[in-house]
Image (cartoon, grey):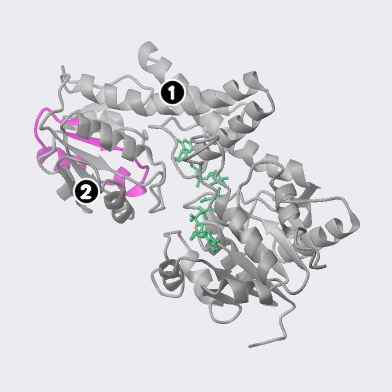
Amino acid sequence: MNESFKKKILCIGAGYVGGPTMAMIAHKCPQYKVTVVDINPDRINEWNSENLPIYEPGLYEIVKSSRGKNLFFHTDVKKGIQESDIIFVSVNTPTKTFGVGAGMAADLQYWEKTARQILECSQSPKIIVEKSTLPVKTALAMERILSSADSGIHFEVLSNPEFLAEGTAVKDLENPDRVLIGSSLTESGLKARDELVEIYENWVPRKQIITSNIWSSELSKLVANAFLAQRISSINAISDLCEKTDADVSEVANAIGMDSRIGDRFLKASVGFGGSCFKKDILNLVYLCRNYGLTEVADYWESVVRINEYQKKRFVLNMLKAMFNTLADKKICLLGFAFKADTGDTRETPALYIANKLLEENAKLVISDPKALKNAKKDLKEAKGDISYVEDPYQAAKGCHAIAILTEWALYTELDYRKIYDSMEKPAFLFDGRNIVSHQEIYEIGFNVYPIGKPALKHF
Ligand code: NAD
Ligand code: UGA
């Protein structure tokens, strides 16, 4: 082993965050040795192969540039801990499904197991970096566990939440709006903070590396996701009103987004937000607020999730109503199953809710997606009904009564919709859950078109 590395970094958890973030650190900092460990050997094997476990544009290139040089993936967590100076913890923190706080609070069992394992295996002082999204005050629990053994080893806990979005992870990591580092304000806390700053300074301008107290940092991550999701629920709520009043939600979004105080991003009305984090992090925030007795604050943030559920439900009801109040035995093509474009991830995807509801109406489903069919099959394993999976969108739509666009893949904007129309049952319907196709053109081909937050274009 090359012992000339400046520092040894370990990341526990080789998921959507651990893998890409560590690949970027290794790529930008050849002087550091970066090791990523996971308890899931299949995931590690994939990280060591040509078929990475996650699809992310540009990721393979940066992994390949460092793998085997200063970037390593393996399953030996103990050895990884022993060797490292700095440990990032990037394990999953899903919503708790059992006991107190079920359905709301974060399930911290994976995170706590890593804390205990770090304590058990360490023989030298270490900096522990919370990369996972955690409830505010978790660092206190982390510190208590790490100082419980009286081993004399000092662990300094930092919070360094990750703000990357899937589908743009490489771009976001390479050019982050900011990097946030929270630390305790003691001498050792500030020293550890500076060591982490030094890593990011290899490619992020210093003014974009912001530091704060550790609780602000933990809370900022939950609040950032809550604000982003809130914008989507806000515009989705307005999309409902637009459909009733013949206003056009894209025109409204454009008009308000040009106000620089509002800004134009994250104002795309849709079938609802998905992904592993928005719902879980808001519920986590809501749970925290309730715990502190802040009922009104909790209710306010919970409404963001409620509107999202309503938007998905409304989409299915609109389909049912438009198609003469019966979907039984009708074939419906779902274009897109991933929760957003440029990822194969289907966690909390609105498409799953919609698929299940359509199956309850006895519709037959043909599901198409360029990257997410493997996950779609897993998600619908238990579902009862007639479901087929067809990657080619033309084949998928053939013989269908309706198409529902559920993911904003660029390829769906470029399809030959006349060819598709000709191969479908008539009257043919198109429900655009992402407002990505040209509705007037598609209407002129012969489709009955139902966008989100715009008047429907119908031939009857
Ligand atoms: P993930 O499920 O893809 O990855 C977590 C990995 O941790 C899994 O591979 C799991 O096997 C591993 N793991 C669990 N316990 C372990 C242990 N004791 N030892 C070793 N490995 C262990 O999750 P993710 O999407 O990467 O999210 C991780 C954290 O980052 C979460 O807290 C999430 O909220 C946060 N986050 C996610 C994103 C995102 O885009 N997915 C973005 C920002 C923050
Ligand atoms: C989100 C945040 O954007 C990241 O900053 C954060 O790090 C991450 O969550 C996390 O903590 O996991 P991500 O969920 O990967 O990232 O993707 P987004 O681009 O935020 O999209 C989330 C959902 O909102 C998708 O379903 C997307 O289609 C939807 N969306 C987004 C809209 O419906 N309208 C929009 O205008 C934008």
Residue 308 seen by the camera: yes
Residue identified by numbered label 1: 249
Rendered view: 18 above or below 453: below
> Would you say 452 lies left or right of 114 here?
left
Residue ranking furthest to the right: 187
Residue 29 seen by the camera: no
Residue identified by numbered label 2: 393
- Residue 45 x/y as whole percent: 42, 73
Name the amino acid type tagged 1: Val
Q: Residue at x 47, y 45 (%)?
A: 276
Q: Residue at x 56, y 34 (%)?
A: 282
> Would you say 388 lies left or right of 86 here?
left
> Would you say 399 lies left or right of 69 here?
left
Looking at the figure, which quarter contains the C terminus?
top left
> Mark 2 and mark 1: span between their CA atoms?
27 Å
Q: Which residues are magenta?
A: 402-429
- Residue 226 x/y as whole percent: 59, 34
Looking at the figure, which quarter contains the N terminus?
bottom right
Name the amino acid type tagged 2: Pro
Q: Nearer the viewer, residue 199 or 95?
A: 95
